[in-house]
Image (spheres, helix red, strand yellow):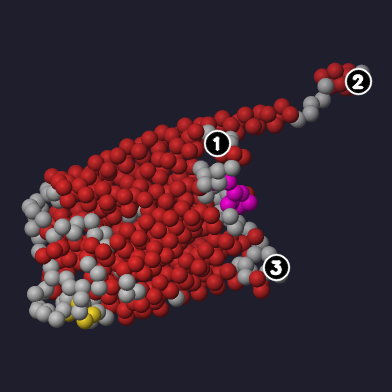
Amino acid sequence: MRLLDERIWLLFRRHLQQTLTYWSVFFSFGLCVAFLGPTILDLRCQTQTTLQQITWVFFSQQFFLLVGSTVGGLFKKTLLSSLSALFASALVISLVFAIIPLCHHVILLSVAMGVEGAAMGVIDTIGNLQLVRLYQKDSAVFLQALHFFIGLGALVSPLVVDPFLAEDSCVLSANWTANSSGSDLEHLRNTLAGHGALLHNASQYPLYTEGVVVTRVSYAFWIMAVINLPVPAAVLALMFHERLVRCCRSSPPLLTKKPDISSHPAKEQQQGHGGLLDCRPSNLQGHPATFFIIHALGGAIVFITDGIIGCYAGFVYTYAVSPPLLMGYKAAGCLDSVFWASIMAGRLCFIFFSYRYAAPALLSVSLVGVILVQLLLLIFYSSRVFLFMASCVLGLCISSVFPSMLAFTEDVLDYKGSATIVLVTSASTGEMLLQLLVGSVIHSKGSYSFLLCTTITSFIGFCLFLLLLYVHRVHRNLQTGRSTQTRCRHHAARPQRPAMESWGQNKIFFK
């Protein structure tokens, strides 16, 4: 039995180059997600700054990722502008990887990370939007695969940088002694995975700022720059394939010549027009209130779920090494890897599930699973074995929320493209702000508050999802009523033969 029917396979084969290109761009996005945590200590040595100063590069990357996600919506009008933005962003990522070893001042490094974050945000918005436009009703399957490539890239980058990380202090002062063991540095790296929110215990480690720099992390960044180079080349090849480059403009783009066999081919002409971020009165008028409420609720849900992902990945290590668990540094360091591996495995499994089941059903199961795992963590908070099991199950449950929510909201809103921009921006905002909020709560209330915060936000997210289902039902009824009124008006506007004339014809007939 085939996993997908013939129509889906035909769609995939027809849009093979476009789909593979968007997936490869998200692999480039994934490369940028996971490299900063492991390399932050070596970058501190390279810039010869304190730990508190170097952690500003985390904020720079996250903030400009949010900015790029918002600005990315400006490039959605045409296929040429979208692919040009993807090409520039993918090329910028390779350039930043190559430039990072040359940044010997923390300000220059923060600027470089900000540029990279903006490129990541543009990729996040445009990649999701173009795939939704390409497949429309069938986009759920391909969105799951798209976000699987983020996990794949996030898996590759730590593997690349690991052989080049310093095993001891990478700045040797004049009176240097071997006081920092490899386990201490590994513990500090895992603590910094929470984007530097917990630095109150960092003073116990002898981290010098003056002396001889012995780091070899530059080679890792140059290798990643080379690994990423085929991605902008693939985008450029797609631009040539679609005949969007100036030297190939003699004939129309291929996408306008191919017939669409998706569920709603007639909607292709409406893509890229209007949208929530286009605030002209002509575009905002005519939409019911439910149209805007659905945007707000969908954005709030992914704000919470992506924020939970960032919080759990950032602070599960801190929770594990704190009382009452007091796990060893090496065992606790595996929790983050288990969590991200389960997210990647979950997105791979949901490629099949999203074809078999509707997006609301998948979202219901995922959000209920997230709540149950969080509640069990509160109950078995002192069990080390259950923490590993919960990390795995939580990653499986929460992995599909964003792509399923994106497919669902775009379907509800008739694929206008505005939902993609709102959801991507909300997810980036949640990942940045919830980590800061939970980090401050952990600092003041203790590590157990980490579980309490994520559980409360999980409940809020599920309640918002139930409200979204209700608003969706109201919105569908409004749309049905409007379409019925339009048909009635169209029928009433048609010219009808006068009754006397019809009576006269019948009179002649009977004669």
Q: Position of residue 155 (x, y in %)?
A: 31, 68
Give amino acid for label 1: His
Q: CA distance from mark 2 to mark 1?
A: 52 Å
Q: Residue at x 57, y 61 (%)?
A: 81
Between tags 2 and 3, which lies in front?
3
The answer to whether residue 234 is above or below residue 413 is below
Q: Residue at x 48, y 35 (%)?
A: 290
Q: Nearer the viewer, residue 350 or 449?
A: 449
Residue denoted by label 1 = 287
Give amino acid for label 3: Ser
- Which label was assigned to residue 251? 3
Q: Position of residue 482 (x, y in %)?
A: 58, 31
Identify the mark nearer the N-term, 1 or 3: 3
Identify the mark nearer the N-term, 2 or 3: 3
Residue denoted by label 2 = 508
From where the camera sits, is residue 398 visible?
no
The answer to whether residue 33 is above or below residue 492 is below
Q: Main secondary structure of the magenta part?
A: loop
Is 480 magenta? The answer is no
Q: CA distance from mark 1 to mark 3?
A: 37 Å
Q: Which region is colored magenta?
A: 268-275
